[in-house]
Image (cartoon, helix red, strand yellow):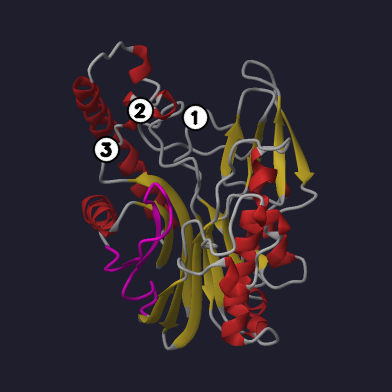
């Protein structure tokens, strides 16, 4: 019996317009900045037209990436609300893939922009095993005090009664063909702006570290710290941190070289340092583990993994001969691929947009013990 499990940050699957760019140019789309717009009413009309015109191509590519992942259970990040998820599933996935995801789960979380984590599930796996939800729990309201996770680093930017998860940790208790499987879907704190001499990643790392510690505590409290490794669980989502990266050195018009770097520290060390869970993407070769291309000009460009499937030790060992797939055909053309790893992009993909997402779906076929 096999199960295909995937995670994908689809980026801003929204049902609303954001007009704040008229008064805050940092939030204004770059194409609008090319024109002089004197009236807020005209700005709103232009912004609506721009978003609607661009969205169809984008969501077709998002759906193609999901279709290529062909998952039985799909963990998603950056979903506006259930209405957005339903409209996308019916209008794009069902029409394009031909086999819809009838089970949909989303709980409103804590994100200030209103983007949430969600789960789409088929009624059965591809080999006919029933997928059943036994229970679902949101941990969006859990505070640092609740889990005794507050420390001096967090005190610089947070209070003890603040919520730990900046979006949510959505916990699903499932039966797959009668076999128990627990799923934890997250979207950790994004890397912010530099602060107090630290770059955006370092300045926000204490928050992500606390989120990772909280996920681990939730799992250990449920199963027992000494028994958690023997259970079938997966932690999935965009964790906005990486333990390694591939530096891309060079510029367009010249040759590139690629250097693999291991980070001195990461918030995700909470999962890996003692074998609590395995990042199965590490089973791929070093230059082929990335799920996102980051750049701020030729002096700062690298490939890194932000999107994860962490498996419990027992589940990982049971699937020792397998490795996950990374779907990269929805990447924009500006993404720089190491030699020999290039893929054919989806039709109408642009240099920067439209695209399926800056993130890549990660999917793995699992046998449950």
Q: Is residue 244 visible?
A: yes
What numbered label is drawn on residue 17?
3
* Left or right of 223, for residue 267: right
Q: Secondary structure at mark 3?
A: loop
Q: Which mark is residue 21?
A: 2
Q: Closer to the camera: disc 3 or disc 2?
A: 2
For disc 1, the marked residue is: 333
Q: Earlier in the sequence, mark 1 or mark 3?
A: 3
Q: Residues within 10 Å of mark 3 (few under 14, many from 20)?
A: few
Please say if 315 is above or below 214. Answer: below
Taking 50 as reference, is 364 left or right?
Answer: right
Classify mark 2: helix, strand or loop: helix
- Give the percent coordinates (x, y) of residue 57: 30, 36
Nearest the viewer among 195 and 180 is: 195
Q: Picture coordinates of residue 261 (x, y %)?
A: 77, 43
Residue 353 lies, with reference to residue 243, above or below; the image says: above
Q: Nearer the viewer, residue 48 or 86?
A: 48
Q: In whole angstroms, how far apart are the C-alphas of marks 1 and 3? A: 27 Å
Which quadrant holds the C terminus?
A: bottom right
The residue carrying pointer 2 sits among few (fewer than 14), some (14 to 19) or many (20 or more) residues within 10 Å by Cα, namely some
Residue at the right extreme of this rendering: 264
């Amino acid at each position: 019996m096999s199960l295909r499990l995937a995670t994908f940050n689809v980026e801003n699957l929204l049902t609303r317009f954001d007009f704040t760019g008229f008064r805050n140019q940092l939030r204004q789309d770059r194409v609008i900045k090319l024109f002089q717009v004197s009236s807020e009413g005209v700005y709103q009309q232009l912004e609506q037209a721009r978003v609607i015109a661009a969205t169809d191509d984008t969501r077709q590519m998002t759906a193609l990436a999901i279709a290529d992942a062909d998952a039985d259970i799909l963990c998603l990040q950056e979903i506006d609300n259930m209405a957005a998820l339903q409209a996308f599933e019916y209008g794009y996935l069902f029409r394009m893939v031909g086999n819809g995801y009838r089970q949909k789960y989303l709980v409103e979380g804590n994100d200030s922009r209103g983007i949430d984590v969600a789960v789409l599930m088929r009624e059965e796996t591809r080999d006919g095993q029933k997928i059943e939800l036994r229970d679902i729990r949101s941990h969006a309201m859990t505070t640092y005090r609740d889990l005794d996770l507050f420390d001096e680093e967090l005190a610089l930017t947070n209070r003890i009664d603040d919520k730990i998860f900046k979006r949510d940790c959505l916990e699903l208790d499932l039966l797959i063909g009668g076999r128990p499987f627990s799923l934890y879907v997250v979207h950790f704190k994004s890397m912010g702006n530099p602060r107090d001499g630290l770059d955006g990643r370092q300045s926000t790392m204490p928050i992500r570290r606390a989120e990772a510690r909280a996920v681990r505590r939730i799992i250990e409290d449920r199963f027992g710290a000494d028994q958690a490794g023997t259970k079938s669980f997966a932690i999935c989502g965009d964790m906005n941190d990486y333990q390694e990266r591939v530096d891309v050195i060079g510029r367009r018009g010249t040759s590139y070289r690629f250097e693999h770097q291991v980070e001195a520290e990461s918030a995700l060390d909470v999962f890996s340092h003692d074998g609590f869970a395995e990042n199965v993407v590490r089973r791929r070769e070093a230059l082929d583990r990335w799920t996102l291309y980051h750049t701020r000009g030729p002096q700062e460009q690298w490939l890194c993994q932000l999107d994860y499937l962490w498996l419990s030790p027992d589940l990982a060992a049971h699937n020792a001969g397998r490795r996950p797939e990374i779907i990269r055909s929805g990447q924009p053309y500006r993404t720089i691929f190491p030699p020999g790893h290039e893929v054919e992009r989806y039709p109408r993909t642009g240099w920067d947009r439209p695209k399926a997402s800056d993130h890549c779906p990660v999917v793995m076929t699992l046998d449950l013990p």
